[in-house]
């Protein structure tokens, strides 16, 4: 084969992440897993979209090919991290990540230790009681006890509230 007729190797340019996470060090680049990064980028993108996104919207926002997004979405749906809308044209996060987070031993221990104290506090004060943990500038509601009264103010478990909004 002559040099002129040899096929050229085409390399894809690295895609920009959907949201810039914390700064990475050079050591982090040694252990790259592009497929995992792509899947996590999809999950992070969908987490910001309460109504979900179509595949075309995901492709556009991630600047990826339709085929690679299709394959990744199919795997995320099959593993139940992402669900399709009833009409089948939109993708949104399922509650699987929420369920996994609640199985995380440190969170379970914290909640299990706090619930009896929270329950007593709510009964004595006749108010709802919430356990919040700091998470990236927000308060994540990890546990909640309703007021014993007929009405109360409460935040659902898993809700995020701005740290300065509490």
Image: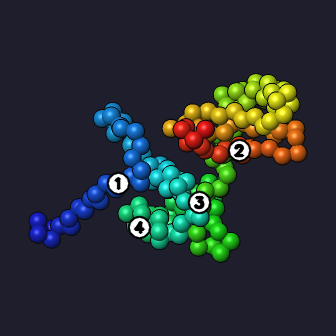
Report the disc number at residue 155: 2
Mark 1 and mark 4 residues within 8 Å of each other at the beta carbon: no
Q: Is residue 65 above or below residue 97?
A: below
Q: Tell which tag, 4 or 3, sits nearer the viewer.
A: 3
N-term mark: 2 or 4:
4
- Position of residue 16 measured from the top left corner of the image (x, y, whole percent): 34, 54
The CA distance from mark 1 to mark 3 is: 23 Å
N-term mark: 4 or 3:
3
Quadrant hosting residue 133? top right
Q: At 41% across and 43% down in the image, what residue appears?
A: 21
Residues 57 and 158: in front is 158
Position of residue 80 in the picture relative to residue 56 (left or right): right
Q: Element under label 2?
A: loop
Label 1, residues with CA under 10 Å away: few <14, some 14-19, many ≥20 = few
N-term mark: 3 or 2:
3
Q: Tell which tag, 2 or 4, sits nearer the viewer.
A: 2
The CA distance from mark 4 to mark 3 is: 18 Å
Q: Element under label 1?
A: loop
């Amino acid at each position: 084969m002559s040099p002129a007729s040899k096929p050229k190797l085409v390399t894809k340019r690295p895609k920009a992440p959907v949201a810039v996470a914390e700064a990475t060090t050079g050591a982090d680049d040694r252990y790259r897993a592009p497929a995992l990064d792509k899947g996590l980028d999809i999950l992070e993108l969908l987490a910001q979209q309460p109504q979900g996104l179509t595949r075309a919207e995901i492709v556009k926002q991630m600047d990826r090919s339709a085929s690679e997004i299709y394959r990744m979405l199919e795997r995320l749906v099959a593993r139940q991290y992402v669900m399709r809308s009833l009409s089948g044209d939109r993708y949104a996060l399922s509650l699987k990540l929420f369920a996994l987070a609640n199985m995380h031993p440190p969170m379970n221990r914290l909640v299990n230790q706090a619930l009896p104290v929270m329950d007593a506090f709510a009964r004595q004060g006749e108010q709802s009681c919430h356990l919040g943990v700091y998470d990236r500038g927000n308060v994540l509601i990890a546990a909640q006890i309703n007021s014993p009264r007929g009405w109360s103010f409460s935040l659902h478990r898993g809700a995020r509230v701005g740290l300065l909004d509490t």
